[in-house]
Amino acid sequence: MKALVTGAAGFIGSYVSRQLIDNGYEVVGIDNLNDYYEVSLKHARLQWVQEKAGFQFIEMDLADKAAVTQLFAEHTFDRVINLAAQAGVRYSIENPDVYVSSNLVGFLNILEGCRHQKVPHLVFASSSSVYGLNTKLPFATTDSVDHPVSLYAATKKANELMAHTYAHLYGLPVTGLRFFTVYGPWGRPDMAAWGFTKNIMAGKTINVYNYGKMRRDFTYIDDIVEGVVRIAEKIPAGVEGWTPESGDKSRSSAPYKVYNIGNHNSVELGEFISTLESAIGKKADINYMEMQPGDVVATHANVDDLVADVDFAPNTPLAEGLGKFVEWYKAYHAE
């Protein structure tokens, strides 16, 4: 069995690549190694993945149609796990063009490659950000997601629509995964766990938006990976008699499904910070600020269908996950 993992030098992509190899897959990983955050971290993740035999890395931009076409011509994939994307809600407000190139054009090229090769299952990263202005908690995959509040969220919603189109037109089995605030070792420097830890340890002030009145469903990386690899083996089928008017919005008459992968527990930012302070052993100096454009007040995942379909729900306690992150962070920066 051979799998393609896009974004293989990324946070989630590096973990998924290692786990697929452990599960017996040969993995081809691609990444464009862009400088959205320090490229040295991406190279370090790649070295970590390359500790495993059975991994081939190719530096490639998904927006390069000729390169992606050649990739699919040279390899036959049993699974494609698309985790490559330009990440970051706030960055999408300042740099919208990058999101169109990576998240829309790049994803289209992956869909085309999967279509022509008749890949048995495409799994792709969506995001909890697609819930946008929704206020009913917890967020369920049966909810409407038509009101995003950032371009990043809009591109993820667009990915779901594009994927459904290919499932309908060409019978391509596709599954979208709405990730909820992923954290853990090898994480991203632009996210709260890393940024707060860096500043608290250095005695610098941390900026906390919406005066701390934010809630997030913080999900530990190991739980995300377990969900991804289980879903990769759960190939969706169309639901007979399904209609948009009466059917589950996360399913279709086509071979298409969307899942939430979250810790199904919404934590206030203040609790997250106090838990992080305990893990670090140092208090934070906090600068409370107004709500940022593109942010949402709260996220909380309903994972009932994940449990029903693959018998799994993320469950790592926040204190355990942040403890592991801080331990890794100190070791990584001591090298």
Image (spheres, helix red, strand yellow):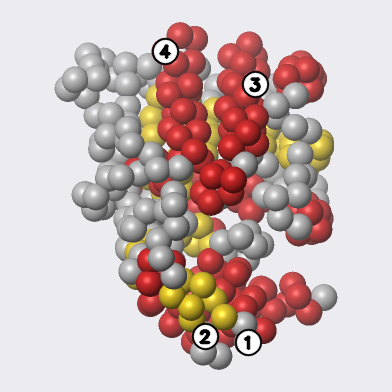
Residue corresponding to mark 1? 203
Report the amino acid beneath label 4.
His
Q: CA distance from mark 2 to mark 3?
A: 46 Å
Front residue of 318/199: it is 199
For the residues marked 4 and 2, what is the alpha-carbon distance in whole angstroms? 52 Å
Badges 1 and 2: C-beta atoms under 8 Å apart?
yes
Q: Secondary structure at mark 2?
A: strand
Mark 4 or mark 1, which has the lower sequence index?
4
Structural distance between the alpha carbons of marks 1 and 2: 8 Å
List the residue tagged with mark 4: 168
Q: Where does label 2 land, which residue?
A: 285
Three-letter code, disc 2: Asp
User: Mark 3 belongs to which amino acid?
Assistant: Asn
Judged by depth in the image, the label closer to the viewer, 1 or 3, is 1
Estimate the spatial distance between the alpha carbons at disc 3 and disc 4, rounded to whole Å: 17 Å
Which quadrant of the figure has residue 81?
A: top right
Which of discs 4 and 2 lies nearer the camera? The answer is 2
Quadrant that contains the C terminus? bottom right
Q: Residue furthest left?
A: 246
Residue shown at 33%/58% (left/top)? 298
